[in-house]
Image (cartoon, coloured by chain):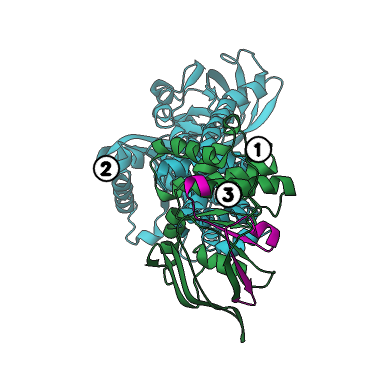
Chain colours: A green, B cyan
Amino acid sequence: MIECKNITKVYKNGDEETTVLKGVSFKIEDGEFVAITGPSGSGKSTLMHILGCLDTPTSGSYFLDGRDVSKLSDNQLADVRSNQIGFVFQSFNLLSRTTVMRNVTLPLVYSGVPDAEHDGRAAQALRAAGLPEERWNFKSNQLSGGQIQRVAIARSLVNNPSVIMADEPTGNLDSKTGEIVLGTFQQLNKEHGATIILITHDSDIAHHADRVISIKDGLIIEDKKNTKQKVVDHALL
Amino acid sequence: MTIKNLYRETAAALLSNKSRSGLTVLGIVIGIMSVIVMLAVGNGTSSSIQSSIQGLGSNLLTVSAGAARGPGTQVRGSAGSAQSLTVADATAIQDRVSGVANVSPEVSSNQQIVAANANSNSSIYGVQSVYATVHNVEMQEGSFISDKNNQSLSRVVVLGPTLSQDLFGVGAEAIGQTVRFNNLEFTVIGVTKAKGGSGFTNPDSAAYIPLSTAQQMITGNQFVSSIAVEAASADVSQSVQDGITSLLLKRHNITDSTKADFNIQSQASLSSTLSSITTILTYLLAAIASISLIVGGIGIMNMMLTTVTERTKEIGLRKAIGAKKRDISMQFLAEAVALTMVGGIIGVVLGYLISYAVTLTGLLTATVTTSSVLLAVGVSAGIGIVFGYFPARRAANLNPIEALRYE
C-alpha cells in the first residue's frame, strides 16, 4: 500500500528555486492499477522518482507498506528499491548482448537471493510476463521491441515487489506492440494481483488503468475511477 | 553481491568488448614484461661481471711499486716506476703475514718481440711458477715457467694465444720456435689457454719469462714491479692487506703511512665498486621499464573512464533495481584489477620466455628472480586498484535518475 501525504519537491539551482510538486496527497491500495498522467513539466516524472524511491521529497511523507521511506539514506533506499519496487522503463534498459535469463536474474544478484533460486524465480516471472519459453536463452539484441519490454516486465517482477512502476512503457513501441504490453500489465493486475503505477503523458494509454490521477503544475487536478477502462483483447497476447 | 556474482559480472563486462579489453591488457603486459626482463638482464650482467672478476684471480691483492697518490694530487708515477719492491719483500710477505696463500713477485716490461716473419709489441712479465696459480693461468700446450727455469736463468718464454698467432700464424706450432727481444733469443716452451680480455690488460697477448732472467737480462736490477698476493679467502683479504701494509712500511723504514712507496689494490674493492655500479644500472633499467608500467596503468584508467561513461545508463539501471554504491564501485574496481592481473600473469610468462631467449643467445645469463616476479605482480595489482579506484568511485556516485536519462 502506498500513502503520500502533502509531498513537495523543490529543486535548487544556485539562488533559483523551482517547486515541482506543491503538496500531493493520495493513497494507492494493493492490487490497484493506477495511471499517473499529465503533460510534460507537470511533475509526474518527479513524482514517479519519489514513488520509486530514486529520490526523496523536500517535505511531506511517503509510506510504502506502512513504512515512512521519505527520509531514508541512499543505501536504505537501494534496499527498498531492491525488495519492494519493480521498474519498467521507456527505453527498456536491458543489458546488451546478454541473455534474457541473465537480464531477468540481475535484480536477484543485488537482493541477495541464493544463486540456486535464480532460474526458478526468473522462469516464474517470464511466464507471468508472457515471454515464450523458447526465447529465454536469446540475447537481448535478438528480440523484438515488444519481447524486450516483456523481458523488462519480467525483470521488474522477479523480486515479487509491492509495486511496479512503469514509466512510459509504450513510448518506444508501435501502437499494436504497445497494446500488447498494456494488456500484459492488465493481466498481471487481474490474474496476479500486482499493484501497478503507469506513468504516461498520453490519456489514451492512461485509460487502460482502472484509476487515473491527473497532475498539472505540481498539483493533482483529478483523481477518479476509470469507468471506461480499455481492456486489451486476450487474443492479442 | 556475492564474490561469485561479482566474478561473473566482471567476466561478462570484460568479454563483451574483447578487443578493447585485450589492448588495455597489452599495455600492462608490456610494462610487467619489460620490468622482469630488465631486472633479469641486470642481474645477469652483474653476475657475469662478478665472475669475470673472479676469473682474474680470486682474493687477489696487488702490491705495486710507486708512491701512493698524495692527498689533493692528481699526478702519480706509473706502477713500477719507483723501484722499491724486491723478491725479498715477497718472501717476507709469504713468511710473516698470516692468511696469505700465494705470493707472486712480478716484473713487467714492454718489448718488441720479433719472430721469423712477424713482430709484435707486447707486455713481457718476469714471473715465478706460482704466477700460474695466482692468476689462474692454464696451458693450451707446453708448460709454464718452472722454478728450475728461474734457478737456471733460462731464456725460455711462454706466449699468450693471441700473441702466438700474431707471431707464427694461426694453427702453426709455436713450441720450440725462437723469438727475439731486447737482442736476446728466447725459446718458446708453452702457449697459455685463451682467457679473454678482462680488467685492464689482455693476458692473451702477453708473454712470460722467468723472473730471474727478466731481472738479470732486461731490467738489470733486483727490483720487481709488483707483487700479487692471494689471500686464503675473501674474508681475510682486508686483514692480509693491513698486514702487508705494516710489514712493508717497517721493511722500507717508513713511519708515515701516507708516504708509502707502494700501494695495494684489492680485487675485493674493485669487485664491490663494480657490483654497486651494476646494481645502480639494474635499478635504472627497472625504473625505465616501470615507466611503461605506469603508461599501461593510465591506459587502464582511460579505458575504465570510457566504460563508465558508456555504461552510464547501465549503472543507472543497476542502481534502480537495488545496487548500492558499494556494489557498483566493487564491480568497476574488480574489472580494473582483473585486467591488470591478467596482464600481469601474461607479462610474467612473456618475461620468463624473453629472459630465457636472451640466455640462449649466450651473451649473458638473464636470471628471473622470485622477488622481481612478486614485485611485478604486486605492482600490477596495485595499479589496478589505484587506477581503477577513480573511475569506480565516479560510477558509484552517479545519480540514478540522471544516469537513467543519460543518452
* Mark closer to the observer (3, 2): 3
Which of the labelled discs sits on residue B97, or is there none? 2
Q: To which residue does mark 1 refer?
A: A235
Quadrant assignment for the C terminus of chain B? bottom right
* Mark closer to the observer (3, 1): 1
On whether residue A210 falls in the magenta region, the answer is yes
In percent of the image, x 50 and y 78: which residue is there?
A58
Quadrant in the picture for residue B196? top right
Is residue B218 depicted above or below A52 in this figure? above
Is residue B293 depicted above or below A32 in this figure? above
* Amino acid residing under circle 3: Phe
In the depicted view, which residue is nearer to us: A81 or B94?
Answer: A81
Question: Label 2, label 1: how many angstroms apart (C-alpha)?
Answer: 114 Å
What stretch of residues is rendered in magenta?
A: A190-219
Residue B18 visible, this angle: no
Q: Chain of mark 3?
A: A
Image coords of residue B298 (percent x, y): 60, 54
Tell whether A144 sits left or right of A114: right
In the depicted view, which residue is nearer to us: A120 or B110?
Answer: A120
Image coords of residue A15 (percent x, y): 61, 87
Question: Label 3, label 1: how many angstroms apart (C-alpha)?
Answer: 15 Å
Q: Are marks 3 and 2 on the same chain?
A: no
For numbered disc 3, what is the local secondary structure? Answer: helix
Q: To which residue does mark 3 refer?
A: A185
